Amino acid sequence: MATFGGFVAGKTRLTPLPEQFFGQLLPQIDDLDELKVTLYMLWYVTNQRGYPRYMTLAELEAESVVLAALDDGSTDAARAQERLRRAVDSAVARGTLLRLQVADDRGGTVYLLINSPEGRRAMREVQRGELELDTRGPVVAEPQIRPERPTIYALYEQNIGLLQPLIVDELRQAERDYPPEWIEDAFRIAAERNVRHWRYVEAILERWARTGRAGAKPGEEQ
């Protein structure tokens, strides 16, 4: 069984859930896959901005976090996607999600919305031709089930020491500014050189941002 290292100290982003989720919806859901997909959709849509808020089925099928959550141990993305589609069907049948298929030059796009006042409004407007949705660019062509990378907070505690509240905001900003593989490699370089200090890791990241990492091998500093 994989273990969880615990929530980090300091400020963390919270995802609100409607009271109805706990009082009405949770007791009804009897399928773990449906529960996982429902929670992910609530998180994803809540963290979007603007109107309307939605996710395409193709985008959901390309999310490695979801596929890993639905993996049966085979690391077969196609099998995980099939479980995901069944979970989506269940959530739509239950009334948690709204599914809308719109014809386009690629043969059609399936959109998923939360069955909320905003979601129902968007669906009506699309059906009346008053609102046009887009797919926000291409999705991953060949989804993969990837092991989840350690968070920047876990890397800090593994390589530097106990996480202090004063450093949390800096780590959160670095997580926004740099790719996960850069952060992981920068911590590895600092540990290999026995320089266990965040400023050193930060300096590596800043240098890569200025000069780029084209052609660099994982773990190499440019």
Image: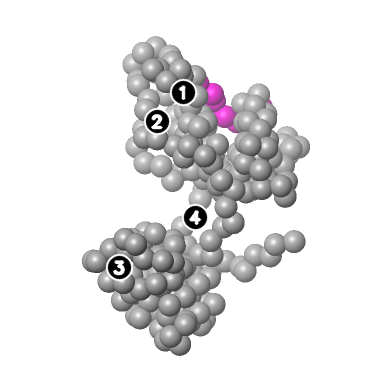
Colour style of the rendered protein structure = one colour
Please state if 83 lies on the left or on the right of 98 as rendered. Answer: right
Query: In x, y percent, where is residue 195?
Result: 42, 86
The image quadrant of residue 171 is: bottom left
Query: Which residue lies under the disc numbered 4?
Result: 14
Q: Quadrant of the N terminus?
A: bottom right
Q: Earlier in the sequence, mark 4 or mark 1?
A: 4
- Mark 4 touching mark 2, by CB under 8 A? no
Of all residues, the one furthest to the bottom in this rendering is 194
Query: Which residue lies under the disc numbered 1?
Result: 109
Cα separation between marks 3 and 1: 38 Å
- SS of the residue under disc 2: loop
In reply to whether residue 95 is colored magenta, the answer given is yes
Cα separation between marks 2 and 1: 8 Å
Query: Which residue lies under the disc numbered 3?
Result: 208
Query: How would you rate the neighbour count of disc 4 (Cα within 10 Å): few for under 14, some for 14-19, many for 20 or more?
Result: few
- Mark 4 touching mark 3, by CB under 8 A? no
Which one is in front, 88 or 109? Answer: 109
Q: Please name which of the two marks, 4 or 1, marks the residue nearer to the observer.
A: 1
Of all residues, the one furthest to the top in this rendering is 128
Q: Which mark, residue 135? A: 2
Residue 26 appearing in the image: no
In reply to whether residue 165 is colored magenta, the answer given is no
Query: In x, y percent, where is residue 42?
Result: 53, 41
- SS of the residue under disc 4: loop
Query: How would you rate the neighbour count of disc 1 (Cα within 10 Å): few for under 14, some for 14-19, many for 20 or more?
Result: some
Above or below, comparing residue 98 to residue 64 in the picture: above
Query: In x, y percent, where is residue 203?
Result: 31, 76
The magenta stretch is: 94-100
Q: Callout 4, which amino acid?
A: Leu
Q: Please name which of the two marks, 3 or 2, marks the residue nearer to the observer.
A: 3
